[in-house]
Image (cartoon, rainbow, N blue to C red):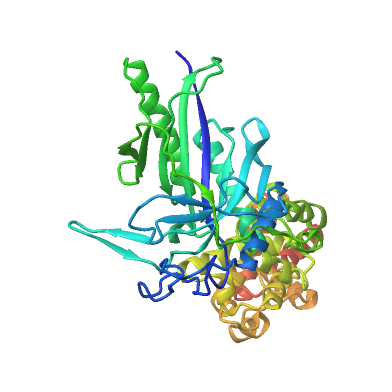
Amino acid sequence: MEYEATIGIEIHCQMKTVTKMFSGAPCTYGRKANTAVNEIDLGMPGTLPCLNMEAVRKAIMACTGLHLTIDPLVKFDRKNYYYSDLPKGFQITQQFHPIGKNGYVVIDTGEGPRKIRINRIHMEEDTAKQFHLKTKTLLDFNRSGTPLIEIVSEPDMHNGQEAEAYVEALRRTLYYLGVSDCRMEEGSMRCDVNISIAPKGSGKLGVKNEIKNMNSISNIGKAVDYEINRQKTVLENGGEIFQETRRFDEKTGTTVMMRRKEGTVDYKYFPEPNIFPIRLDPEWIKDIQDNMPELPEVREERYSREYGLSAHDISILIANKEISDFFEKVMEYSDNAKGVCNWLLGDVSGWLNRHEMSIENCVLLPENLAKLVKMVDDGRINGKQAKELVDDLMEGKDPEGAAKERGMEQVSDEGALRAMVVSVLDANPQAIEDFKAGKDRAVGFLVGQVMKASRGKANPGVVNTLIKEELKNR
């Protein structure tokens, strides 16, 4: 029997704010445990929440970038449950009044672009972080109260590739907008993936299994494809799929059951009594929307229109916002977009990877990279010589000065090069005879001899032209 998978994804994304959702405690990562938390985050008696205006602003940006309709009436609810990572015994969320509804993202599939619908985006607060040891669990409340948006998709995906593309599209948009740093490895973006399979064409949904806390886009694809095959195998062998919460084991590439779900959990929601409903000023919302950063899809279109880059180059360039931003700065000094793009995606990125450094933390100057590209274009140095200047360039040195120090600027003066060419031809009469006999490789040999005579400084393009001119006269 042929089966069809149905996939929906819930994403929790920490918003990039200075302070927490309902308190003045700082939002941090990697700080000493329990040093970035206050009495409001810990749910101490007598404390009251105060809504973070910047978090609301960033949630509006997320809704706008993902094409959701914004609800100007902000209302919060309490999600009641008792767990060790939730000190208040409830989570402040937006169960009944999400800030945004009915949006979408467009992903590329093997069958062309396709819309993946987004059901809702709502704001809430993060929980504490748990560290499970052999005999006990430790709690770090630094994360408690960090502003979150939860993005809930419709079940519009059908395989691991589509799930990866959806999460990447969201990650890219939220990162470009500055809503979140989207560092999945640090937990600032976490995904829960729901998967079910049913006979193809049945129009029914199968029993849903949830894979919790995915923290890598590539692992999402692997987990989805494994889980689809696992469920197929169970059904084909006459077994039954039970509603379960599972986790992905990176070492084995499999999903592992954590617990079985007996039914729908009732969290007992009710309106948050300590935060009155807030009606947002339409002019404030409009001002936020009118002054948003450039979206990645807009930048893609502009790079194609203004710079004539290929779709492949653009996709790689856009994938890293810092590299893309640096490309923009270099282009203020250069008219060779393809050359700049090649250097950024090639030697510059390679150097950054080897030194475990980001482009914004190195001392490479945009005007120096533009100058290096121009030196190659003008034939003052060749590509091999330019690569030898990468270390100097990445250390903030002027490539012209570095090239002179290394004695590598090419000789392009025709008078000087013609004298070398004549000398080489006089010394190699057999090569001239080979050329006249139709052996084109003789030209390459002669170019090599001139390059050797010039100790690599001759411009090979000019030399090649001069040799052909001289050979015609002999």
> Within the image, what quadrant is residue 165 found in?
top right
Q: Is residue 389 above or below residue 65?
A: below
User: Does the rendering let one see residue 342?
Assistant: no
Place of residue 126 in the rendered image (x, y in percent of width and height, measured from the top left) = 47, 59
Number of numbered discs on residues: 0
Q: Residue at x 53, y 53 (%)?
A: 93
Pick whichever, 254 or 126, lies toward us.
126
Answer left or right for 4 relative to 404: left
Instruction: Name the quadrant of the N terminus.
Output: top left
Place of residue 310 in the rendered image (x, y in percent of width and height, measured from the top left) = 72, 49
Outermost residue, left side: 135
Q: Residue at x 44, y 33 (%)?
A: 225
Place of residue 247 in the rendered image (x, y in percent of width and height, measured from the top left) = 35, 43
Instruction: Name the quadrant of the C terminus.
Output: bottom right
Q: Is residue 372 above or below residue 83?
A: below
User: Does the rendering let one see residue 26?
Assistant: yes
Q: Is residue 184 above or below residue 21?
A: above
Q: Is residue 410 above or below residue 294?
A: below
Place of residue 261 in the rendered image (x, y in percent of width and height, measured from the top left) = 35, 34
